Image (cartoon, rainbow, N blue to C red):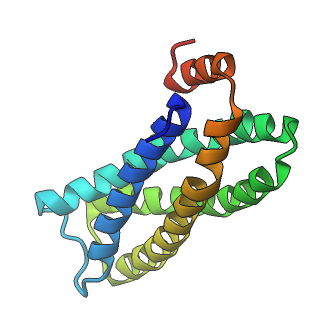
C-alpha cells in the first residue's frame, strides 16, 4: 500500500492489468482460437479493447506528461526515459492487439488472424508484465517518496478527471 494516492491508483491499475494479461496468456496457450460465442472469450476481447483504448494509453500519457517530467525536475530523468521507450514499443502493439480484438469480436478468428493475434498478444503480455514490474519496483516508490502533498492532490485530480 502506498501513502500517495497516485502511486496507489497506478498500483491498483497494474494489478488489474496483470490479471488481464494472465487471462490473455491462458487463452493464447490454447491451440484453438478464442471462440466469440463463448461469453468468457467474448468478454476477454471486450476487456482487451477497453483496457488498451482507455486505461493503458491514458496511463502511459499521464506518466509521460506529468510523472516523468516531475521526476526529471528533481534529477531522476533516467527512469522516465527508459519507461517512455518501453511505452513507444507497447503503444503500437496494444493498438494492433485492440484492432485484432475488435475484428474478432464481430467476425471471429480464422487460422491467419488467430496466429497474428497469438503473436502480437504474446509479445504484448511479455512486455507489459515486465514493464509493470519495473514500475512497481522503481517508479511507484520513487513517486511515493518524492511527491509533495500539494502536487499529489493536483495530479491526482488531473488523473481522475476532477479538474
Q: Is residue 50 above or below residue 40?
A: above
Q: Position of residue 103 (x, y in %)?
A: 37, 59
Q: Position of residue 154 (x, y in %)?
A: 63, 17
| 134 lies left or right of 41 | right
- Closest to the observer: 69 or 151? 151
Q: Is residue 153 above or below residue 123?
A: above
Q: Residue at x 47, y 37 (%)?
A: 8
| 66 lies left or right of 94 | right
Image quadrant assignment for residue 145: top right
- Closest to the observer: 109 or 92? 92
| 154 lies left or right of 75 | left
- Closest to the observer: 110 or 19? 19
Image quadrant assignment for residue 138: bottom right
Q: Position of residue 89 (x, y in %)?
A: 67, 64
Q: Residue furthest top?
A: 163
Image quadrant assignment for residue 36: bottom left
Q: Residue at x 30, y 83 (%)?
A: 29
Q: Residue furthest left?
A: 38
Q: Residue at x 76, y 50 (%)?
A: 80
The quarter of the picture where the C terminus appears is top right
| 46 lies left or right of 153 | left
The quarter of the picture where the N terminus appears is top left
Q: Residue at x 50, y 24 (%)?
A: 160
Q: Position of residue 122 (x, y in %)?
A: 45, 76
Number of marks in the rendered image: 0
Amino acid at each position: 500500500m502506498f501513502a500517495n494516492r497516485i502511486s496507489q491508483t497506478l498500483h491498483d491499475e497494474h494489478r488489474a492489468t496483470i490479471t488481464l494479461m494472465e487471462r490473455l496468456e491462458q487463452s493464447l496457450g490454447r491451440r484453438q482460437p478464442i471462440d466469440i460465442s463463448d461469453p468468457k472469450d467474448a468478454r476477454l476481447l471486450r476487456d482487451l479493447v477497453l483496457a488498451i483504448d482507455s486505461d493503458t494509453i491514458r496511463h502511459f500519457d499521464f506518466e509521460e506528461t506529468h510523472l516523468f517530467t516531475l521526476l526529471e525536475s528533481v534529477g531522476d530523468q533516467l527512469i522516465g526515459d527508459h519507461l517512455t521507450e518501453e511505452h513507444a514499443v507497447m503503444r503500437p502493439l496494444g493498438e494492433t492487439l485492440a484492432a485484432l480484438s475488435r475484428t474478432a469480436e464481430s467476425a471471429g478468428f480464422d487460422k491467419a488472424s488467430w496466429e497474428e493475434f497469438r503473436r502480437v498478444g504474446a509479445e504484448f503480455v511479455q512486455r507489459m508484465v515486465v514493464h509493470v514490474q519495473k514500475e512497481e519496483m522503481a517508479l511507484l516508490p520513487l513517486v511515493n517518496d518524492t511527491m509533495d502533498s500539494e502536487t499529489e492532490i493536483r495530479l491526482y485530480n488531473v488523473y481522475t478527471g476532477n479538474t
